[in-house]
Image (cartoon, rainbow, N blue to C red):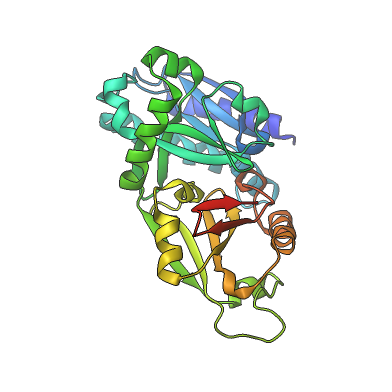
Amino acid sequence: MTKEQFIEEVSGHLQSLMGDRKLDVSWEVITKNNNIPKYGIVVKNFNRYVSPMIYMDGYYQDYLRKKVTIDDVSIQIADTLRRLKENPDRYQRFSMSWEECREKIIFRLVSADKNKFMLEGIPFFPFLDLAVTFAVMVNFTSKGLETLTVTNELMKRWNITKTELYRRAEANTPSLLPIKFQSMTRMILEYVGVDVCGPDGDSDCPLIIASNEAGVYGASVILYPDEIKKLADRMRENLYILPSSIHELVIIPEKQKMSIDDLSNMVSQINKDHVCPEEVLSDQAYFYDRASDKFIY
C-alpha cells in the first residue's frame, strides 16, 4: 500500500469514528525544513479556532513494519482530536494581532541553501551560511513547542519592519527559551566513530552541548546576545562550534587544536549517518574568536 493510499484509508476511518458530518477530512503534502515533504491529514471545520494537521509519515512507517493496523492509527488520531476538541481553551484567546504576538516572537536558524524556496515567502536575515527566521510561540508543553511561522504576508499585516521583528525576537527568545549548556564526554563522539580528542588520548576533552530548555530549534542560542562570548571568556578559549542539528550545537575549546575543514567533514558525515534530513542545520563547522567577538567559517 502506498503512503497516499494509507492516508486515504485513515481519512475515511476518521470521518466515521468522529461521527461529525461537518468535518472536512483531507490530506496534504507540506514542505518542511530543508525542503523535506511531510504528509498530513487536515481536519477542517473542526472548531472556530483551529484546523488540526496530523502528520502521518511516522504512522505509515509503523504500519509498514506491522506495528499498527489502519484501525489502530485511526483510533489513536480520533482520540487525539477528541481531546483537542474538548479542550480548546488555549486557542480561544489567541489572535494573530501584533499586540497579541509581539511578546511571543522568537527566532530560529535553518540552512539557507536547503530552504531557498521557503525563504522566498518569509522574512529572514543571513547569518554565516544560515538563515535567521521567525515564529510566534503559541504554546510550550511536555509534548513539544507549538509555533506559527512568520510569513511576509503576516509581517505586512502587522506593518512592521524586519529590523523590528529581529529586535523583538532577540529580546524574547532568551527569555522564553533560556539557554542550556550540558557537558559531554568524549564517549559520545567515539560512539559515532569519531575521536576528536586527538591521537594522544587526552581524557580531558571538554565538549559542551548548547541548546535551549525546550530542546527545540536550540541551535539558535548562538544568536543570544553575549552568551557564546560569556562561555568563551569563562573557558578563556576561542571555540569551535559544530551545528549537530537545528536543535543543538556542540562546542569545543580551541586548545584541542583542530582543523575547521576536518571538523566540517566530521559534521557532514554525522549529518548523513545520524541526523534526520529535516533536522540537519549545516555541514559547516564554525570558529568563534573571543577577541573580535566574531564567528568565522
- The answer to whether 144 is drawn above or below residue 209 in the figure is above
Q: How many marks?
A: 0
Residue drawn where x is 50% and y is 63% of the image: 209
Question: Quick check: can you spot residue 82?
Answer: no
Residue 257: give x, y in percent of width and height.
65, 72
Q: Nearer the viewer, residue 91 or 44?
A: 91
Q: Nearer the viewer, residue 236 or 205?
A: 236
Left or right: 198 in relation to 209: right
Question: Quick check: can you spot residue 286?
Answer: yes
The N terminus sits in image quarter: top right
Left or right: 170 in relation to 71: left
- The answer to whether 32 is drawn above or below residue 282 in the figure is above
Residue drawn where x is 49% and y is 40% of the image: 108
Residue 139: give x, y in percent of width and height.
34, 38
Residue 94: give x, y in percent of width and height.
29, 25
Residue 190: give x, y in percent of width and height.
66, 75
